[in-house]
Amino acid sequence: MYQPETPDPAAPGATQGDASASPRARRVTIDDLARRLGLTKGTVSRALNGYSDISHRTRRRVAQAAEEMGYRPLAQAQSIRTGRTRSLGLVLERGGHDDQRPFLAEFLEGLTLSASEAGWTLTVATAGPGDEMTATLGRLIDERKADGFVLPRTRTSDPRIALLRAAGVPFVLYGRTGDPAGCAWYDVEGEAAMREAVLRLAAAGHRRVGYIGGGDFHYAGLRRAGAGSGVAEAGLPADPELFAEAALTREGGREAALRLWSLPQPPTALVCAVDMAALGVYRAAAELGLSVGRDVSVISYDGIPEAAHADPPLTTYHVETRAAGGRLAELLIALCRGAAPETLRETVRARLRPGGSDGAPRLTPDELAARVAQARTGHRRSSTKWEEQPR
Amino acid sequence: MYQPETPDPAAPGATQGDASASPRARRVTIDDLARRLGLTKGTVSRALNGYSDISHRTRRRVAQAAEEMGYRPLAQAQSIRTGRTRSLGLVLERGGHDDQRPFLAEFLEGLTLSASEAGWTLTVATAGPGDEMTATLGRLIDERKADGFVLPRTRTSDPRIALLRAAGVPFVLYGRTGDPAGCAWYDVEGEAAMREAVLRLAAAGHRRVGYIGGGDFHYAGLRRAGAGSGVAEAGLPADPELFAEAALTREGGREAALRLWSLPQPPTALVCAVDMAALGVYRAAAELGLSVGRDVSVISYDGIPEAAHADPPLTTYHVETRAAGGRLAELLIALCRGAAPETLRETVRARLRPGGSDGAPRLTPDELAARVAQARTGHRRSSTKWEEQPR
DNA sequence: CCCCTTGCCGAAACCGGTTTCGGTAACGAC
DNA sequence: GTCGTTACCGAAACCGGTTTCGGCAAGGGG
C-alpha cells in the first residue's frame, strides 16, 4: 500500500470523524437496482432515461423499483459520460456597488428554488471585474462545473457573452444586451416603468421633470430612453439639462439632486433609475430643507426594502427579484436541455408601489429655485457637507 | 441508434448553439498526458497525487508536462472514485429576516474567494426552516454535491448539526453551539463586544444601561451574557427590567426602545445586539424627540453599511463578514482533508467603529423620563411621521 | 416455409479518473 | 555469485453511470 505524501499533516487514509457512525452509508447504485430487477445496468439506465427500445412494462418496473429503493443517480458519475452535470453557474461581480446587495438574497432564493425543483443545483463563484471575470468563467467551463450560466447585470457589450458564445456554453441573461443573437433572457421592462413615472408626474401637474440614472449596464440606456419618451409623450419641455445626471449610489443621487436643484429652472420632480439614488435625493432634500412628496416629488425603480422604510415611503416601481431568479433558472434549464435560445426570451412589467414621495407640485420652478437659494446662503447649518459643492 | 424520447421538443441530439464554433473543445485528459510522456495513466495519476512510489524525476516530468498541456483533472471524474468533489456546500435559510441580507454578498465573496484559491467551488441551496432544511441538506449529502458544509447562524441546539454529525459529513459553524463535540467553527466574540460596549458607556458616565437583543440563535445568549458581565464589572445596578427586551428587526428595536424609555427610570443608554434593532431605536428616539448621541446613547453590533450612513453614524462593533467567509472556507477545506475538528476552532474580536451615537449622558433618568412623558402627551404632532424628525 | 422486420434486452465498451497488485531491474549484503 | 530488498512502474480492476452494438424471439409478408 503506497500512500500519497503531500495531503496535509493529518492522517491521509482516515476519513474524518474517526469513530463516528456509518462512514457515509453506501448509496444504492444502478447495479443494485439491476441486480434486484434481474436486468443489466445498461438496460436499467436506458429505461430510466426513456430510450425507445425498452418495453413499456419494463420501464414501469424499473421506475417503481427505483422509487422503492430510493435510487438517485450520482450526477457526477453521469456527467463524465454525458458532459452534463445538472448544475447552474452564477458568477457574481466582487466588490460591486452596495446597490446590488439587497437583491442578492432574493435572487438566490429564486434561482435555487427553481433549480432544486428540477433536481439541479447552483454553483456560485465571484470575480473581480474585467479579466478576472472571464478567467473565472473559463475555469468553471472547462472544469465542467456548470452546464450553463446565469448572467446578471448585463452590459450592452458584455465580454461574458462573447466568451460563452465562443465556447458554445448555454447562458441566459438577466437583462438584455446590445447584440441579442443567440441569447436567451429574462428582463423587467424598466423603460416602460420610467415612461410611466414621467407620465404620472406630468398628470399630477409637473412640467419640469428631471432624470437621474446611468451606469454602464445595458438597462441604463433603456431606462433613460423610456423616461425620454415619457417626456415627449406628455408634451413636456425636453430640456437636456434635466437629463444630464448619472448616479447609482446614495451619494451619487444626492449630488445629482443638488446639482439639478441648483439650476435656474430646477425640476419639481425627479425620476430615478434606481432606488439607491432616490435615497440620496432624500438626503439632498433634507439638506435643502425641502419636504419630499410636498415640495418636490420623487419616483424611482427597484423596490428595495429600504425604500419602503424611507420617510416618506418611496414611490417606486417594484421588481420581483425572487421571481426573476426563479424564471431564469427555468429558462436556463430548458436551454441546457436543447431548447432554442430565441424561444426563451421573456420580459415582464415592474409594478408600481405607490408611496408618499410624489404628488402635485406645490412650488413652481421659480419658487423652488428661491427656496434652494435661501437654504444655501442664509440658514447655513453647521458641518453639512453640501456646502462644499460648487455654487 | 436508439434515442431517448422524453427530453423536450427540441432536437435531442443537437448540442445547443447549432452551428457555433467548437462543440466544447476537447479537454486534455490524463490519457493524453500519459501518452505524451510514454507512461500509463495510472502512473501519471499517482505522480500527480504525490504517491511515494514514483521517482522524483518522473514526478517532475509529469508535473511539467501537465503544466504545459494545461491539464486539469475533471473533478467529477475523480469524485466517483474518491467520493470527494472539491466543493463546499451552503444552505441558506429562505425568507430569513432582512437582517441577514446585508451580509450575504460579502459572506459569499469571502467563501468563494478562498474556495477558488484552493481550486474548490461553492454549491448554494436554500431551504425553508425546519424539516425542509434537513431535507435539503440530506439531498445534497447523498447526491454528493458537497464534501462539507458551512453552517451560518447556528442555534444552541441545531438540527443541521445533528444531521451532519450522524451522517459523518464534515461541517464548520459560523458561530458556536450548545454541544461543541466534534464541531469546528469560526466566530466573532460578540459577548466581548457587548461587554466592552457597556463598559464604554459606564466610563462615559451612564448608570442605567439597557440591552436589546435576542432571537433564538446561539449568539443571542452569548451577547446578553456579555452585556450582563459588563454591567456587573462596571458596578452598575443590575435591573432586570433593562434587559428584558428582544428584537432583531428595525420595528422590533423601535418597540423595545419605546418600552424601555417608558419605564419610570429609563435607561440613558442602550446596547443593541444587532444594528438593525439599533436603527429602530433611532426611529423611536425621533418619535420621542430625543437626539441620539446627545439625549440618549446607543451602541450596537454588526457594522452594516446603513449604520454608517445613519444620522448620526452608529457607534458599532464591526464584524468582517468577508474575512469570516474566507476563513470558514479554509477551515472547511482543511477539515475535508482530514484535519481534526478540535484543531479548527477560531474566534476573533469585533472591532469598534466609533460613530456619533454615544457620549456622556446629558440627562438623568428622571429628566429623560420627563422628556418622554412630555413627548407622549402634549406636543403630539399631526399624522405624518416624517415631520417628527428633529430640527 | 422462409425471410425480413421489429421489439426488446444483454454484453461490452466507454467516460476520466484512482487504486491495487505484481513484476522487473538495480542495488547492497553475504 | 546468489539472495533478498528496495525503487519504480505497468497492467488491470474499479467507481457509477451511459451508449453502442448485436443477437434472439416474435410477428408479418410473400
Image (cartoon, coloured by chain):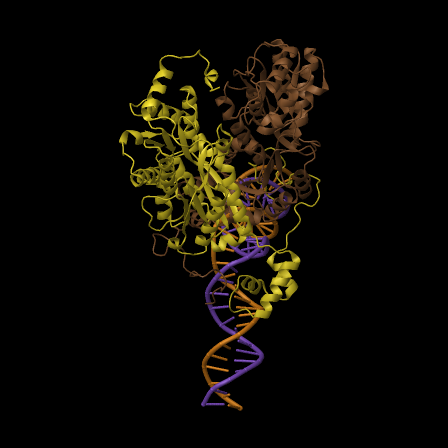
Chain colours: A brown, B yellow, C purple, D orange
Depth check, front residue: C7 or B361: B361
Residue found at x 60% / y 66%: B60
Locate the N terminus of chain A and report the quarter of the image it occupies: bottom left
Residue found at x 32% / y 26%: B365
Q: Position of residue B193 (x, y in %)?
A: 39, 41
Depth check, front residue: B374 or B350: B374
Q: Quadrant of residue A226?
A: top right
Q: Is residue B39 left or right of residue B128?
A: right
Q: Position of residue B138 (x, y in %)?
A: 41, 42
User: Against A353, is B269 above or below?
Assistant: below
Q: Is residue B276 left or right of residue B14?
A: left
Depth check, front residue: B56 or A31: B56
Q: Is residue B176 left or right of residue A351?
A: left
Q: Position of residue A63 (x, y in %)?
A: 45, 40
User: Against B209, is A353 above or below?
Assistant: above
Residue found at x 49% / y 25%: A305
Q: Position of residue A83 (x, y in %)?
A: 58, 46
From where the camera sits, is residue A197 visible? no
Q: How many marks?
A: 0
Locate the C terminus of chain A and report the quarter of the image it occupies: top right
Q: Quadrant of residue A192?
A: top right
From where the camera sits, is residue A280 visible? yes
Depth check, front residue: A216 or A346: A216
User: Against B337, is B313 above or below?
Assistant: above
